[in-house]
Amino acid sequence: MTPEARIATAAEILDEVLAGEPAEKALTGWARRSRFAGSKDRAAIRDHVFDALRCKRSFAAIGGAMTGRGLMIGLLRAEGRNPDEVFTGQGHAPAALSEDERAAGHAPSEAEAADLPDWMLPDFTVSLGEGWQQVADTLRTRAPVMLRVNARKTTREDVLPLLAADGVIAQPVEVSPTALVVVEGARRIGGAAAYLNGLVELQDGASQAVVDRLPLAEGQRVLDYCAGGGGKTLAMAGRVRADFYAHDANPRRLKDLPDRAERAGVPVKLLETGMLSARGPFDLVLCDAPCSGSGAWRRSPEGKWALTDASLTQLNRVQDEILDNAQSLVSAGGVLAYATCSVFQRENQDRVAAFISRLPDWRVLWQKSWTPGPEGDGFFAACLTRAAG
Ligand SMILES: C[S@@+](CC[C@H](N)C(=O)[O-])C[C@H]1O[C@@H](n2cnc3c(N)ncnc32)[C@H](O)[C@@H]1O
């Protein structure tokens, strides 16, 4: 496919997404119908679609329309290119611009330029202070592909040449002693021997940094209360030998964990909700709570546009409920850890403060935020314990 044909296809797929189809589904549907497209075409079209979804408001403003064509015109103008050079109507290129399209477009407002919904701007600025624009700008860019080295099986230094032998070039980063950023060959990770043998896992750098800070010790009983696919369970198990238990309100979310744990060489027991009290208490209970995902909107930009003030408030209720339920499973002297991949104070510091005001016998050991950047997503974590007495 020519570069122009890829833009035309991205515009069509974006129209489906704007009509309500999830981006992944629209991309997969197109790829199934378009066997002529090669892997490079698929990758380029995917990049166009996700670049446009990250910058949907600003591209629509400068492109003149919230349509697939408008977004692609906006993308080209944002890159300083003249859309007329791509929208030629020749071969498989998109149809030539009309006079109206050529004249359309306006300078973006503050929220449009930041690619945030208007309602969100106050929450964003309160949560991030002076750095809010930089964070909004970061969320408009592609996320790094990052790996976690399984310290149970290898070291960063030893695994780098193994990855390179399979075409995956990675570099150590500072955010965590187990983190690598992939600089070349990201699409080869799934077939790399180091991945297949459990030496590395795909995991964001800040996720790893959160786990680094948890006060884990050998022989503890540790519960991952919102384990999902088990990324944090495995990262914790990579650090110490302890008894790891994984739970999720939606047990189907845990389905990949047994295989991943086996590959990583770490035993993890799955627990259903009804078994939690009987199997407790636990020395450490981690609540990696469902959240807006705002710290990871580079990876999942549709979440940025789907979130509403009301859905954020509803998430806050779920977060409070999770903390209230999980605290009863923590042993005397044990630790309750709370984490989100959100940048919003409402989901982070405010939830911790609300918890302490409901249950004043708890105190905060530490809390920390990570902003999205070259070494990872935005994250928040806090550790709490019951005050002695
Ligand atoms: C942020 S994800 C967890 C990601 C996972 N820890 C990881 O590192 O891969 C949040 C998880 O919380 C689960 N969840 C939602 N409500 C819950 C509840 N009330 N109790 C426990 N888990 C819940 C969701 O099903 C989801 O899998």
Image (cartoon, rainbow, N blue to C red):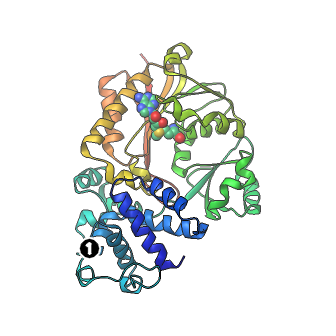
Q: Residue furthest top?
A: 278
Q: Of 65 and 94, which appears nearest the observer?
A: 94
Name above or below for residue 96 compared with residue 295: below
Q: Of 224 and 197, which appears nearest the observer?
A: 197
Q: Position of residue 366 (x, y in %)?
A: 44, 37
Name above or below for residue 377 compared with residue 45: above
- Residue beneath disc 1: 64
In percent of the image, x 54 and y 21: which residue is there? 282
The local secondary structure at tag 1 comes to loop
**177 left or right of 210 in image:** right
Q: Is mark 1 within 8 Å of ligand 1?
A: no
The number of numbered badges drawn on the structure is 1
User: Quick one: quadrant of the N terminus?
Assistant: bottom right
Q: Position of residue 66 (x, y in %)?
A: 28, 66
Q: Of 170 and 3, which appears nearest the observer?
A: 3
Q: Amino acid at mark 1?
A: Gly
Note whether residue 140 is visible. Answer: no
Note whether residue 91 is visible. Answer: yes
User: Quick one: quadrant of the C terminus?
Assistant: top left
Q: Position of residue 194 (x, y in %)?
A: 73, 51
In percent of the image, x 41 and y 52: which residue is there? 22
